Amino acid sequence: MLGGVRTLATLLFIAGVAAVAVALARTPTVADSGVMAADRLEEVRRDGAVGMECDPRIPIGLRGAVFTCIATLADGATQLVEYTLRPEGRYEVKPQVPTHVPRRRKPALADPRTDRP
């Protein structure tokens, strides 16, 4: 009799742990925007980005995540970039057109081109 109660208690414990594990596996992880922005910025620095801000909360579930970041380019333009994180860890990037065209810089005062009509 005592052995049957122990077996039943063990089975109930295993079932409870399995239920908690399944519930936790289905709960999305929420990534910190600062960490994601820093990682993405390192990837796009060679393309001229000097700053990056991402969505404040980035939920990552079983199917991955979709989030947007705003990249600040070296010339002052900003660019919206949509990232898709796939479950295997690969990123798909969909950059939008920069928000404004970079302005031409004024030539230096000692530049001989400034004397032209």
Image (cartoon, grey):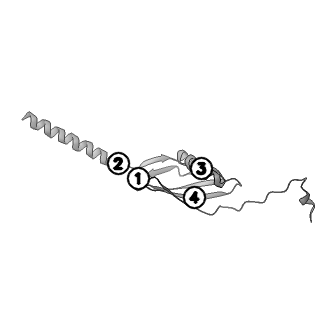
> Dot 1: within a 10 Å radius of its alpha carbon, few (fewer than 14), some, or many (20 or more) residues?
some
Q: Tag 1 or tag 2, which sits nearer the N-term?
A: 2
Rounded to the nearest angstrom, the CA distance separating label 2 from label 1 is 9 Å
Task: Name the residue that disc number 1 marks.
Answer: 61
Task: Name the residue that disc number 4 marks.
Answer: 81
**Image location (x, y in percent) of residue 55:** 53, 52
Q: Tag 1 or tag 4, which sits nearer the N-term?
A: 1
Image-quadrant location for residue 94: bottom right
Which is in the foreground here, disc 4 or disc 3?
3
Rounded to the nearest angstrom, the CA distance separating label 2 from label 3 is 29 Å
Q: Amino acid at mark 1?
A: Gly
Helix, strand or loop status at disc 4: strand
**Image location (x, y in percent) of residue 71:** 62, 54
Image quarter of the N terminus: top left
Task: Name the residue that disc number 3 marks.
Answer: 41
**Do tag 2 and tag 3 residues touch (Cβ < 8 Å)?**
no
Q: Residue at x 35, y 51 (%)?
A: 26
Q: Amino acid at mark 3?
A: Leu
Image-quadrant location for residue 79: bottom right
Image-quadrant location for residue 16: top left
Which is in the foreground here, disc 1 or disc 3?
3
Between 48 and 6, which is closer to the camera in this rendering?
48
Q: Residue at x 16, y 38 (%)?
A: 9
Rounded to the nearest angstrom, the CA distance separating label 1 from label 3 is 23 Å
